[in-house]
Amino acid sequence: MPARTITKAVLLHISGPDAPGLTAELTAILARNNACILDIGQAVVHETLALGMLFEVPAGGSLASLRSALLNRARAHGLNARFKVIPRQAVDHWVHGLRHDHFIVTVLGRTITAEHLARVSSIVSAHGMNIDRIDRLSGRLAPEDEPANACVELAVSGDASRELSMRADFLRTAQELSVDIAIQRESIFRRNRRLFAFDMDSTLIQGEVIDELAKMAGVGDQVVRITEAAMRGELDFDESFTRRVALLKGLPSARVFSLLETIPLADGAARLIETLRLLGYKTAILSGGFTFFARSLQKRLGIDTVHANELEIKNGEVTGRIIPPIVNGARKAALLAELARSEGISLEQVVAVGDGANDIPMLNLAGMGIAYRAKPLVRERAGHSISSLGLDGLLYLVGVRDRDLQTHTTKP
């Protein structure tokens, strides 16, 4: 097939009030003139259209007549139309730029302000990246109802060697502005996740079951000190867990099971799991907590798989022992890999969520590891960190928009 001879490459920019059929009319004019569209992008912000098209005019075609036809059609709809002839060298440079690495930057908070976007876009620019697209995923950026979610997603492109330093700048800025900023590679896996695995205590629920049991047993202060040191990574998990459970010896089983009605779910947990089930995701609890509580959550929320620690109870009392094996950090990671294999999916398609040091191995193994309202050590080592929103804010990280769910799920 002979090579296509090109006379002109032209960038058309259309702006003004949006109305149905505009894009169809403009592209029909290009089609009648045998123009070839190289690139196109369109956005509507508050009923105002912004449409850009880069097209080629074939040899023998008349740019003047094509320009006139497009301009007349735009004016008939009250639109502004601007044309710019693009030099061949610039087109070649653009084609080369298509081979850049692509990333998604997600800004999350209760409100997203101009300052937040200014800081984020400045960091992108400082690292030589280009913003290709900006989308609002939440209902509003300054919600009237509290609590509410706000989220903006930026598609950026540039040199992958800048990713780590840009990620560090985002982390510092997020802490300064009390928002969350996540960056991830744009890939076939980002919108093709298949499994969410959660820690339980202080992740799916608001609190630590073992701490509550310790209060009942009158050893609360002792257990809390051990728990905090373990979650900060200062103590070996197995040893610290064994010591904490031993302090529960003699606690009546009736009091143990009474906790099922007293520890609330994390903010947004029910909406998140409901939405994940609606979208066909598999869900799992991989917890260093106890199976009696995890099984209750499984039934309540519809979780597919549960792995946790079996608290030994005999003659109506806690014995102070755990039935092995202990679900520690290494076992969580192993279980995560096993679940991915059993589902026939790549680890890149797995999202892991946790808050403690014993969650770090599975967070680092998963394609997306998220530290949720986590300790500083975990935030530093996880790929992503969410602290400003409830658990349902995780939906934004897999590209789910609020408007897509309005008629299918309950409100946050």
Image (cartoon, rainbow, N blue to C red):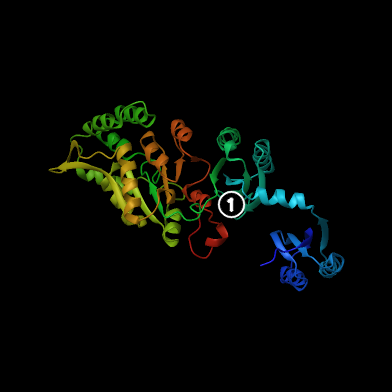
Quick check: can you spot residue 222?
yes
Residue that appears at 61% across and 36% down? 177
Q: Which residue is mark 1?
A: 145
Above/below status of 330 relative to 190 = above
x, y percent for residue 407: 52, 65
Q: Is residue 27 above or below residue 259?
A: below
Secondary structure of the residue carrying tag 1 is: loop
Q: Quarter of the image for the N terminus: give it.
A: bottom right
Q: In screen coordinates, is 131 left or right of 355?
A: right
Query: Which is more toward the observer, 395 or 41?
Result: 41
Q: Is residue 109 left or right of residue 49?
A: left
- Total labels: the figure holds 1
Q: Residue at x 35, y 51 (%)?
A: 340
Query: Residue at 35% of width from left, 39% of height from top?
Result: 208
Amino acid, disc 1: Asp
Which quadrant of the structure image shows residue 171? top right
Q: Nearer the viewer, residue 392 or 255?
A: 392
Q: Residue 371, position in %: x, y? A: 45, 40
Q: Position of residue 96 (x, y in %)?
A: 66, 48
Relative to residue 101, is residue 358 drawn left or right?
left
State the residue lying farthest toward the left: 315
Label 1: few (<14), some or many (≥20) within 10 Å? few
